[in-house]
Amino acid sequence: MAVPGAAAVVVVGLVFVTSGLIVNIMQAIFFVLIRPLSMRTYRRISGALGELLWLELVFLMDWWARVKMQLYIDRETFQSMGKESALILCNHKSDIDWLVTMGLAQRAGILGKTIALMKSESKRFPSGLQQLEEYPRPFWLALFAEGTRFTPEKLLAAQEYAASVGLPIPRNVLIPRTKGFVETIRRIRSFVPAIYDITVAVPKGVPKPTMLGIFKGKTSVVDVRVKRYLTKDLPETDEGVAQWCRDLFTDKDAVLDKHIADNTFSDDELLDIGLSKKSFVVVAFWVCLLSFGTLKFLQWSALLQSWKGIGFSAFAVCSMTFVMHMLLQSTRSDLSTPAKLSSAKPKNGGEHPADKQN
């Protein structure tokens, strides 16, 4: 990792870890003092505190790396964002799709009340989804139905499976795992009125954004298309809901084909959402607070006034750099393990063997 990138990793890592520790301590205090009296109040406070952390990541994308998010959305849907609870369905093309979703949630004023389900969580979490009925509204529930990041190897496996069972051959997406989606809809249908179909694509001629690239300050552009559906319009049967999900991803595949041809989501309106000013203010607050605290700690401990203290500080910084670097490497989609698909026919209310991928 280059020196500027390593320096950024150290600074951001120290800010995020330290601020995270502060936030977690505060959440623990409110858990003990407020949760027994009012679960709803505790969740509001916990969400607001959590937002102070997630805004740091939005800051990295918006201000540090200047990754421009171009939003294609009709004005009615844009005005609904943040005013209603919604299930978010996004394609999983890269390791920053979840960060794009967080950026949208922040613009909608709902970042502190956004929950993301990825990989096997989409199968385990639905058993607790009914508890969301008591969750402060509105909230967003983000589900990556493909269950794993898109790679050429995973696409090939999905194409072979689709051909073996007579499904449309995917080109730009993977086959969605419908089991988690069906269970989620069954649990939240009565109190989540909308589904936001989010399609993320990178225009030709710009670098593909990655978490590692964002930390290094590499700029990019991300096209984001949002389409709104009403939950009440979905089929009533599990099999029908599963087919609706598969059809949605088939349509998403065609939309991505058109984006590849036109280098834009040309059929949709482009809205300028600008940079997140709130994320800038929050990060400035954390930097000032932690800088002041660090200065006072160094004055009190005299840590840098001895070789032993200097050595300990250098070791801590190097350890932070290594840990953060390994965490960033783990997000790379090109290093993830290809998914394996069986050739069995769909069954059990639309469940596909893709639902059983590791």
Image (cartoon, rainbow, N blue to C red):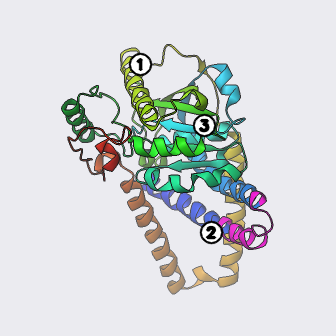
Where residue 37 sits: x, y (%)?
80, 67
What predominant SS class does the magenta segment belong to? Answer: helix
Q: Residue at x 70, y 58 (%)?
A: 49
Q: What residue sits right under mark 2 in the picture? A: 21
The answer to which of 2 and 333 lies nearer the viewer is 333
Q: Of the residues shown, which amino acid type is indicated by label 2?
A: Leu
State whether residue 135 appears in this view. no
The answer to which of 138 and 257 lies nearer the viewer is 138
Q: N-terminal of the two: label 1 or label 3?
A: 3
Q: Secondary structure at mark 2?
A: helix
Q: Residue at x 37, y 37 (%)?
A: 350
Q: What residue sits right under mark 1 in the picture? A: 263
Where residue 306 sits: x, y (%)?
55, 85
Q: Residue at x 42, y 59 (%)?
A: 327
Q: Which residues are magenta?
A: 23-41
Q: Which mark is residue 147?
A: none
Q: Secondary structure at mark 3?
A: helix
Where residue 276 sits: x, y (%)?
66, 39
Q: Which mark is residue 104?
A: 3
Q: Are marks 2 and 1 in contact (CB under 8 Å)?
A: no
Q: Residue at x 53, y 41 (%)?
A: 185
Marks 2 and 1 sit apart, C-alpha to C-alpha, by: 43 Å
Marks 3 and 2 sit apart, C-alpha to C-alpha, by: 26 Å
Taking the image as shown, residue 272 lies to the left or right of residue 167, namely right
The number of discs equals 3
Marks 1 and 3 sit apart, C-alpha to C-alpha, by: 21 Å
Q: Of the residues shown, which amino acid type is indicated by label 3?
A: Leu
Q: N-terminal of the two: label 3 or label 2?
A: 2
Q: N-terminal of the two: label 2 or label 1?
A: 2
Q: Residues within 10 Å of mark 2 (few under 14, many from 20)?
A: few
